Image: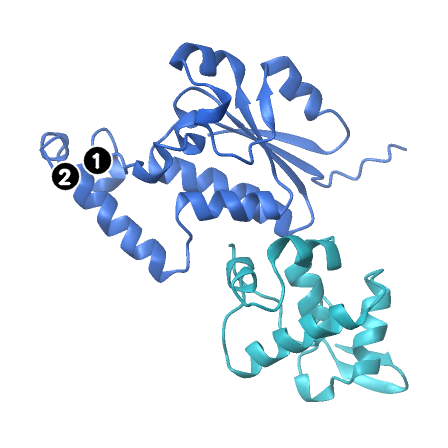
Chain colours: A blue, B cyan
Amino acid sequence: MSQDNGEVRKMMIILSKATLENVYAAFVLANGARMEGIEAEMFFTFFGLEAVHKKKLEHLHVATVGNPAMHMPTMLGGLPGMEALATHMMKKEMERIDMPDVHEFLDILKASGVKLWACKLAMDMFHYKREDLYDDIDGVLTVGDFYKQGSGVGTHMLFV
Amino acid sequence: MEKTIANTVLKVNEEGYLTDFSQWTKEVGSTLAQEANISMTPRHWEVITYLQREFKNEVPLSIRRIGKSGVVDIKEFYQLFPMAPLKTASKIAGIPKPVSCI
């Protein structure tokens, strides 16, 4: 008999987007794992790197174009100020349900034992340096390194 | 459901959370802690007392709120109750399972 009873022991969450709704989804999943006693690690790649970029992480937006759940015509979503308005509204709602802002959320994740990794290839592509990133990031990894981090029974990977 | 701890019959739900807080005693808490493999220290009890106070004031619990409590920070909370801290600590405290995702 296998020792593995199918339980989830570790979540490896890859964040590739910088839109607020995706960033929060990934953060909530990582934090929720820790709250259940499941290990969690995050890999920030491509635009997802903006969620750990010091100068950008406070300025992430909700996508108003190409987002059918916004229930507005795409043309309208592209108008100046629409993204800012939608973002403002979403942030207000988030505060109401006790959702932290991006920086505080990163602090919570770190304090909860989530490992945060930046993707080396994306760092090179965007010309980001280690010091551009959130101070408590655990390191810069290649994809191969990240997979190695996820080795073991009961690990699941998730791409956001 | 019912469960007997220290010669007392307690009302619990299917996950083992007390459904009647008035039945909670420190002895009950200690036994529930043992079941969760937690060796209680005075620091653990401080956190438990805080959770019970919040419960009595009907404040919904979340990891974020714990971090801002001034009683314990998130890092220490995870050190005290390593596996699923909010759930484990709530169970020991005899209060309902928290429903927060944050």
Residue type at mark 1 is Thr
Q: Quick check: marks 1 and 2 in contact, CB under 8 Å? A: yes
Which secondary structure lies at badge 1?
loop
In this image, A123 relative to B12: left or right?
left
Q: Could you say which quadrant of the image residue B84 lies in?
A: bottom right
Q: Position of residue B6 (x, y in %)?
A: 89, 83
Which secondary structure lies at badge 2?
helix
In this image, B60 relative to A67: left or right?
right
Q: Is residue A115 visible?
A: yes
> Whole-Å distance between the Cαs marked 1 and 2?
7 Å
Q: Chain of mark 1?
A: A
- Of labels 1 and 2, earlier in sequence is 1
Instruction: Please name the residue shown 50% across and 70% down the image.
Output: B60
Q: Could you say which quadrant of the image residue B47 lies in?
A: bottom right
Q: Is residue A137 above or below residue B67?
A: above
Q: Chain of mark 2?
A: A
Few, some or many residues within 10 Å of mark 2 (<14, 14–19, 20+) = some
Quadrant where the image shows the N terminus of chain A: top right
Q: Which of the numbered marks, if any, corresponds to residue A35?
A: none
Which residue lies most toward the front here?
Answer: A131
Q: Is residue B2 above or below residue B73?
A: below
What residue is pinned by disc 1? A64
Q: Which of the numbered marks, if any, corresponds to residue A82?
A: 2
Q: Is residue B85 above or below residue A142?
A: below
Instruction: Please name the residue shown 71% across and 63% down the image.
Output: B88
Q: Position of residue A131 (x, y in %)?
A: 48, 25
Q: Is residue B81 visible?
A: no
Few, some or many residues within 10 Å of mark 1 (<14, 14–19, 20+) = many
Which residue is nearer to you in this view: B77 or A18? B77
